[in-house]
Image (cartoon, rainbow, N blue to C red):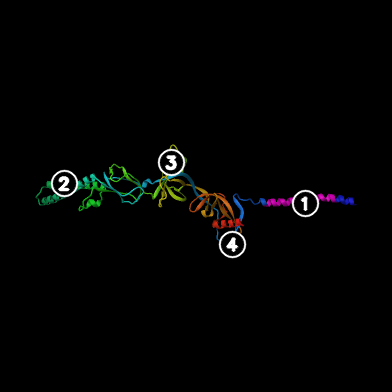
Amino acid sequence: MKYMHFIFAMILLPMFLLSGCSTNGQTDTSKSDASSAYTQPEGQSEEMIKLQEVEAASLRIEEVRQATDSRLLTTTGKIGFNEDRISHVVAPTSGYILDLKAKVGDQVKEGQTLALIKSKELAEAIADFLASKKDLELAQKSYTMTKDLFEHEAASRMSFQQAENDLAKARMQTERNSEKLRIMGVPESQISDASKPIQPIVPIKSPINGVITERQATPAQYVAADGAPLFTIADLSTVWVLGDVFEKDMRLLKPNQRAQVVTPAFPNSVFAARVSRIDTVLDPASRTVKVRSVVTNVQGRLRPEMFATVTFFLAEADSIITVPSKAVLTESGSSFVYLAKPDNTFVRQKVDVQPGEAGRLRLISGLNVGDRIVSDGTILLRAEEDKKGDK
């Protein structure tokens, strides 16, 4: 009987062992399935930040959405003078420089005197003008007298007509001489005011508002009216940005197209620009064409010969994702945002971004449409991270 009990126990033992192993296997499998249901997003921190209700209420949350934006074409270039707003000032007559009133770098106004020239040619022109005025006075008196005699039949018609012709010639000669004085730079007020003598001194005046960038004149220097510039004045309130665009991309650009400019001197400033003109000649060495864009330069920060990066906004649209600049923090060369989770919890998410417009950054990677991020108040979350790290 004891032997039969022993046999029965030996038969049941493997069954109990098999049943126990099977139960354990099911439990492990369920645990494995539960853990595999959650996948950690790439670049996401495992450490959650928990805020109180009051603190969380001070944050601003924004849902990541897709937007339509122009495609971009970025190229290198440099700042140049706006050649439509540059003036080369020449001497209107030959002579000697009496006084220089401006130097390179000076800001000048339109009509401001830059130099004075004393001219022998002008002195001769003044003498001719004064002589022609006297001749005109005599011709006027002769005409008046002859006309009176003719009306009283005391002079012939031929004499009256001759007096008319002499008066017309005197007027024409006086006008020619006065126009010569105007060309030489004599003000109209001096020409018309016979009570004051005209001095043979010509003021050289600025034709525009701007900055003197070159001066080819020295005191007491003799200058000729040969077209050689004495001063070069540039209006730097607007400048050109000359971008080098490859010939394969020329078809994408047209005048008045929108662009933006960034310079190494001011990396955090974006300057708005418009395409002014596209050169008609291609550089055979680089296979590029110069594209000139006009930039407003009110503060005068942009200066000719500065290097620049030009980004053109193309007509073809692209789907993009942008995030507020305030939402992105950068540390040790890496950028990140804070994802908003349920129950006032937040987690750090690494992102790749590039400059955008109007206080926003273009997202390259790291987020998906529909993600909820902290758009304002990231400093508070960063401080909470530091507190947790100190514990």
For the residues labelled 1 and 4, the Cα–Cα distance comes to: 48 Å
Q: Secondary structure at mark 3?
A: strand
Q: What residue did someone put label 1 on? A: 20
Where is residue 354 shown, x and y percent of the image? 51, 49
Which structural element holds mark 1? helix
Task: Identify the main secondary structure in magenta.
Answer: helix
How far apart marks 3 and 1 lie (CA) works out to 80 Å
Q: What is the distance, in whole Å, between disc 2 and disc 3 at their CAs?
A: 63 Å
Bounds of the magenta segment? 9-34
Q: Nearer the viewer, residue 146 or 341?
A: 341
Instruction: Please give the residue where the numbered disc 2 appears in the rendered image.
Output: 166
The residue positioned 59% from the left and 62% from the top of the image is 53
Foreground residue, 280 or 59?
Answer: 59
The label shown at residue 53 is 4
**Residue 253, image quadrant:** top left
N-terminal of the pair, mark 2 or mark 1, is 1
Please identify the residue farthest to the bottom as the structure is shown. 54
- Circle 2 Cα neighbour tier, 10 Å, few/some/many (<14 / 14–19 / ≥20): some
> Which mark lies nearer to you, 1 or 4?
4
Dot 3 corresponds to which residue?
A: 289
Q: Amino acid at mark 2?
A: Asp
Which badge, 4 or 3, is on the more N-terminal residue? 4
Amino acid type at image mark 1:
Gly
Q: CA distance from mark 2 to mark 4?
A: 103 Å
